[in-house]
Image (cartoon, rainbow, N blue to C red):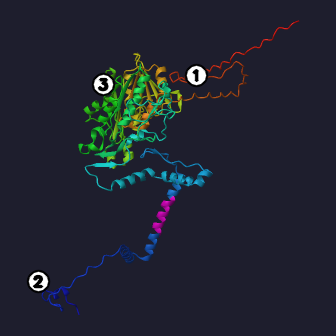
Amino acid sequence: MRKKNKAKQFRYAPNGGNTGKTGSPGRKKASKKPARPTAEEEIERYYELVHLKVPGKSLNRISALNAMVLCGMLAAFCIGSFALEKPVFSQIEKRDLAKMPEFSAASLFKGSLTRDIETYFADTFPLREWLVTLSAVVDESRGIRMDDVRIVQPPGGEVQDIPADASLPENKNPTQPPSGSNLPAVSPNGSSSEDSDSESSSSQAPTLEPPEDDGEPTTVSNGIFVYKGMAMSLFGTSYSNGEWYAEVLNTYHRELPTVQIYNMIIPTASEFYIPKKYADMSASQKDAIDHIYSKEDASIKKVDAWSKLVENRDKYLYFRTDHHWTGLGAYYAYTAFCEQAGLEPIRLEDCETRRLDNFIGTMYAQTQDSTLLQTPDYVDYYIFPQEYEAVRYDRGDPYTAKEHSLWGEYAVSPNCYSVFLHGDFPLIKATTNIKNGRKILVVKESFGNAFAPFLINHYEEVYVVDQRYFEFPLVDFIKQNGINELVFANNSFAVFTPYHIRCIDGLRHQALYPLPAPAPAEPDPQEIPEEPSESSEPEEPVVDAMAYQPEPEPEPEPPKQPPKRVKRMPPRDD
């Protein structure tokens, strides 16, 4: 017999009256909510439904297939880890990857060998670059992006200008502290400057050290600010470090009184393109630059690149995905230099403009922000009508000149900025047919690469020195080559960074790179070797005449011996 619908057995009673159901009148029965199932119960229920839908044999086949796929992927990764060629450099992260450690009993018992092997395989697994990019996309999807702004904690791209094997030159003549400075001044023997001898020579000058610095390479970046497809390093500053930098340049002026010195401090993108709403997150580079200029000797000419750049801020002066400036930004700074040097700048209309497209630079490597990929950069560089010849000197081989050009047109992303000077070299010399007797030397980090080529339009000789890699005493080098102008071209992060300040200071009288030993000549097996004569002398190594030539040290004179006293014998009586 079919049951009646239970819903019809109840009637609505607004005053809690009898609803037709037996029981106490006016009382409602409390309804109990079913308990929420736990995660384990949900999983058990899910598998019960799967077993109802799929036969057991099919489930076994699917399980076996999943296990085979997983094992195959693991096997492929294992085979690839051993069989495929290991990458040595990450283009995305801009760093050298871990290397296979050498076996030694000491490292094995210490435990470092197994850790280094684990790091090596973790750093060089197959498809690493693709997986790193995928991981960045997943990480970026977390959180909220407010006003198209994202802050990345690691230091900005300017840290790229500190090499991984950063080392400081052995300075025989460190800079003296500025007068009235409250920074520590300690002489080489450990005594204070007040106790040092007032008649000490310049080689015994005390060292000016920045406060609260442990001697390690540091930066003044407060992180990376990503805004509407452009990444910029947030600027932080230490005015005491700026005073230290100014005093280093003053020391150059004292030691090179006949050389005209220029100082050009280059602001970075965060000075001009951070929205006003977030401006207090980055210190004023204009104030920091002016503070350094105020501490310099009046004879040092201050190049006001900041004003030229702010006048043209609506143009393409800085890259969006890289921490450097563009060739156009370097051009406007060059016009500011020409005003101080009494030169007429070349017009860009008189140059041939060439371009490298699809440039993704250092800022993307550090942030992995996908918005930077939506607007790739391009690199414009300018070919001048001025003819020149150039040579370079490589690191570790400073006496051998190699033919060079000022533009590396082969450069591709992510190294398109290397189109300027081919990158960083210890020394580049360019010679022109301009016979005006003006010779200039540029001391720079990577920002100066885009600026230095403009100078061949005005000078007979242009020397470009990288302050991190140059291997000769710079003061003696300038004197020996008759250089009469010296320009320091550094970005605002570098002039407040202890590592760069020490490099510039250390160049003045750093230890001389030794001359290479002459290679023994291999005799021709078809010729009978001649017996060397007694008067033959070994050949001197062939070195470039321009390179620094160490002056021979005079041989020490033998100590004077007191005259011997001759005892006279009395005459004999015959």
| Residue at the spot of label 1 | 553
| Residue at the spot of label 3 | 347
- Residue furthest toward the bottom? 1
Q: Nearer the viewer, residue 284 or 434?
A: 284
Instruction: Please tell me which of labels 2 and 3 falls first in the chain.
Output: 2
Camera-side mark, 3 or 1: 1
Which percent across, then down, holds residue 324? Answer: 36, 37
Q: Quadrant of residue 537?
A: top right
Which percent across, then down, holds residue 573? Answer: 86, 7
Identify which amino acid the numbered label 1 is placed on. Glu
Circle 2 — which element? loop
> Which part of the image, by quadrant, shows the C terminus?
top right
> Which part of the image, by quadrant, shows the N terminus?
bottom left
Instruction: Please tell me which of labels 3 and 1 falls first in the chain.
Output: 3
Tell whether position 66 is magenta.
yes
Q: Is residue 233 left or right of residue 482?
A: left
Q: Quadrant of residue 350?
A: top left
Q: Is residue 413 visible?
A: no
Mark 2 in CB contact with mark 1 (< 8 angstroms): no
Identify which amino acid the numbered label 3 is placed on. Arg
Residue range corresponding to the magenta coloring: 64-75
Which percent across, then down, holds residue 570? Answer: 81, 10
Q: Nearer the viewer, residue 152 or 230?
A: 152
Distance of mark 2 from mark 1, alpha carbons?
117 Å
Q: Is residue 137 left or right of residue 532?
A: left
Distance of mark 2 from mark 3, alpha carbons?
93 Å
Q: Nearer the viewer, residue 392 or 492?
A: 492
Q: Name the residue: 30% across, 25% down.
A: 347
Q: Residues within 10 Å of mark 2 (few under 14, many from 20)?
A: few
| Residue at the spot of label 2 | 14
Tell whether position 77 is magenta.
no
